[in-house]
């Protein structure tokens, strides 16, 4: 599975950044995430980890997300453990008038029963991810 997209939001990068870089905040705009719990403490930086619990239909999926890229207010990326075996990366580009282009890339090689995701077209996953980020924009609008 591989998804990439650009989405322009009406907020500057410093408003968008905390929701992407602080992985625990993802549960606020990704409805499939039931829980994102920080493992350990300290600043968010390369090596920081979160335990995620998400839903795939009626099933729970637990994984560990480890930050692999961290360039404040610019780029953040993380690897997700089995069963996702994924890498997610964001890059923020400021535009005039306080807007930001969110560039997102996601690639996964699901294992076990989660391989069922390979049966769905990447375009379906892309639309779901864009919807998640539209929810983020609505949160930022409030």
Image (cartoon, rainbow, N blue to C red):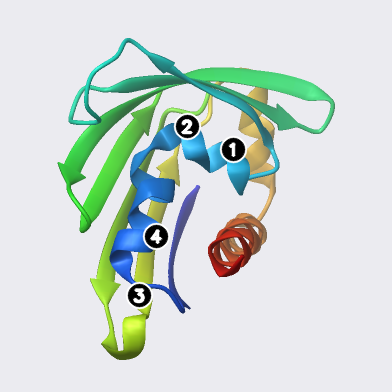
Q: For marks 1 and 2, give the CA distance.
A: 6 Å
Q: Are marks 1 and 2 in contact (CB under 8 Å)?
A: yes
Q: Residue at x 37, y 48 (%)?
A: 18
Q: Residue at x 34, y 72 (%)?
A: 12
**109 up-or-down from 103: above or below:** above
Q: For marks 4 and 3, give the CA distance.
A: 8 Å
Q: Are marks 4 and 3 in contact (CB under 8 Å)?
A: yes
Which of the two discs, 4 and 1, labels the residue nearer the N terminus?
A: 4
Measuring from the top left, give residue 126's x and y in whole percent. Answer: 58, 61
Which of the two discs, 1 and 3, labels the residue nearer the N terminus?
A: 1
Q: Residues within 10 Å of mark 4 (few under 14, many from 20)?
A: many
Q: For marks 2 and 3, give the CA distance.
A: 21 Å
Which of the two discs, 2 and 3, labels the residue nearer the N terminus?
A: 2
Residue, disc 2: 24
Residue, disc 3: 100
SS at mark 4 in the image: helix
Instruction: Name the disc covering residue 16, or none.
Output: 4
SS at mark 3 in the image: strand
Measuring from the top left, give residue 141's x and y in whole percent. Answer: 57, 69
Q: Residues within 10 Å of mark 3 (few under 14, many from 20)?
A: many
Q: Are marks 4 and 2 in contact (CB under 8 Å)?
A: no
Q: Residues within 10 Å of mark 1 (few under 14, many from 20)?
A: some
Measuring from the top left, give residue 75's x and y in whole percent. Answer: 22, 53
């Amino acid at each position: 599975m591989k998804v990439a997209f650009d989405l322009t939001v009406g907020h500057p990068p410093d408003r968008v950044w905390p929701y992407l870089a602080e992985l625990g905040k993802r549960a606020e705009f990704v409805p499939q995430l039931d829980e994102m719990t920080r493992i350990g403490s300290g600043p968010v930086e390369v090596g920081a980890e979160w335990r995620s619990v998400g839903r795939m239909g009626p099933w729970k999926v637990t994984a560990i997300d480890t930050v692999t890229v961290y360039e404040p207010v610019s780029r953040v990326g993380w690897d997700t453990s089995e069963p996702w075996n994924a890498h997610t990366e964001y890059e923020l580009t400021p535009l005039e008038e306080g807007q930001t282009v969110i560039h997102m890339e996601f690639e996964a090689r699901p294992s076990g029963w989660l391989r069922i995701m390979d049966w769905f077209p990447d375009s379906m996953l892309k639309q779901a991810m864009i919807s998640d980020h539209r929810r983020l924009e609505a949160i930022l609008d409030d």
